Image: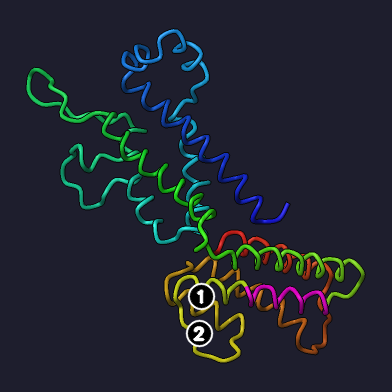
Amino acid sequence: MNNLQKYKKDLETLIDKGDHLYNAMLYACHPAKVKERLGEKAKDFIKDLPKFEETYQSWYSESLTIIRQLLPDRLDDFTRLFAKPKSRKEISYENYVVEDYLQGLQLTRGWEKEIVVDKSAAIPKFEQQLNILKAVKQRFQSSLFDIKQLVQADLLDSELDAAQELNNSGFARGAGAIAGVVLESHLLQVCDNHGSKVAKKDPTIGDLNDLLKGNNVIETPVWRQIQHLADLRNKCDHKKSTEPTKEEIDELIEGIKKVSKTVF
């Protein structure tokens, strides 16, 4: 299964999970209406519903990863629908978010405890999140969807596999050189994704790493990790008194795999 097929399968699974979460939220907020609408089917319907509070966070994290990579222009919209606004001074139906729902937040007024806003206010917010995720699927199906990054990911995986075979056969220096090229290619793509203009004609891993950190694409811990990988790669490219070890190249290859899957 190539990366394109894997993304499609994972996306379908996430959307299906999201639909079930949406139904769970509807039932939690409006149980009587749901039972009335479904009639005899209600019992089986309710039995199969997930617990929103227990399942949402994993759905959110997985969805966030896919949206960050394939629909980055909607990432801020997706996260805003979850997290409480820092500037919020009072709670209203308009600024109630999914995070409030998870905490069971409800606002009442007066001696009569009239409900001003309750968990049902989060229903349209989660629905919007789900629609953003579904927009990723539409992008797959659109002729405008650029699969360049997915094709590149397949190529990079193949090159890392080749580097691993070389290292296993005792050619640590050559394996490290190939792995370094993979890391350079990925970081160049990340710069392109975020509009980070590369000034140098032949930038090094260190140049690209500094550029991404300077443009706030990556944070300091990731920058340090990539810098360490660059040091391992440099040990392979330049003749030194000590040869790179198999263990160092294993670390280089595994580190690049992690970066390629977490830095977009």
Q: Residue at x 40, y 61 (%)?
A: 73
In the rendered image, the vertical position of residue 33 relative to residue 23, given as above or below: above
Give yes or no for residue 180 being in the magenta stretch: yes
Q: Position of residue 211 (x, y in %)?
A: 49, 79
- Disc sitting over residue 191 in the figure: 1
Amino acid under label 2? Val
Crowding near the residue tagged with mark 1, few <14, some 14–19, many ≥20 C-alpha atoms within 10 Å: some
The answer to whether mark 1 and mark 2 are in CB contact below 8 A is yes
Numbered range of the magenta stretch: 173-185
Q: Position of residue 188 (x, y in %)?
A: 57, 77
Amino acid under label 1? Cys
Instruction: Please indicate whether residue 107 sits to the left or right of residue 122 in the image.
Output: left
Question: Which residue is outermost to the top?
Answer: 40
In the rendered image, the vertical position of residue 179 relative to residue 240, given as above or below: above
Question: Which residue is outermost to the bottom?
Answer: 201
Between residue 53 and residue 41, name the one nearer to us: 41
Asked which quadrant contains residue 122, the reply is top left
- Disc sitting over residue 198 in the figure: 2
Q: Position of residue 159 (x, y in %)?
A: 76, 69
Between residue 40 and residue 111, name the one nearer to us: 40
Q: Residue at x 48, y 54 (%)?
A: 67
